[in-house]
Image (cartoon, rainbow, N blue to C red):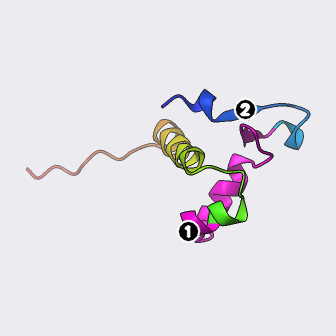
Amino acid sequence: MNFEAYFTRDPNICGGELIVKGTRITLKTILGSLAEGSRIPDILKDYPTLTEDALHAVIAFAAASAEEDLPVRSAPSLA
C-alpha cells in the first residue's frame, strides 16, 4: 500500500506528528480510538474529514509497522 498517498508530516501541523493528509488527525489519535474499542463507523462520525480509505490505511500502516518491529515467534514444531 502506498502510505504516502494518505499520510504526511509537517512540523507546522500537530507538532510534526504523522497525520492523515488534508486533516489535523494524527495516526496516534486514530489508533488510540481503536485501542479503546471505538468502531470504524464511530470514528468516521467523530472525524468527518476522515475517509474510510484513510482509516483502513492507518490500520494497514500499524499492521505493517508491527510486522517490522515485533519479533515473531516461530511456529512450534509438531515433530
Determine if the magenta segment contains residue 29: yes
Amino acid on which disc 2 is placed: Thr
Residue under label 1: 39
Q: Which of the pair 63/75 is nearer the observer? A: 63
Q: Measured along the vertical axis of the image, is residue 30 above or below residue 74?
A: below
Type of amino acid at the residue the image marks with label 1: Arg
Mark 2 and mark 1: span between their CA atoms? 24 Å
Element on which disc 1 rests:
loop
Residue sticking out furthest to the right: 12
For the point 83% across and 31% down, the residue is 10
Crowding at label 2, few (<14), some or many (≥20) Cα neighbours within 10 Å? some
Q: Which residue is mark 2?
A: 8
In the rendered structure, which segment of residues is drawn in magenta?
A: 17-42
| Residue plotted at (58% across, 71% down) | 37
Residue 71 position, x and y percent, is 45, 43
Image quadrant in which you'd find residue 72 = top left
Q: Which badge, 2 or 1, comes first in the chain's sequence?
A: 2
- Return the residue nearer the eye: 76 or 44: 44
Query: Neighbour class for label 1 at 10 Å: few (<14), some, many (≥20)?
Result: few
Residue 33 on image: x %, y %: 66, 64
On screen, residue 2 above or below 43: above
SS type, badge 2: strand
Q: Which mark is residue 69?
A: none
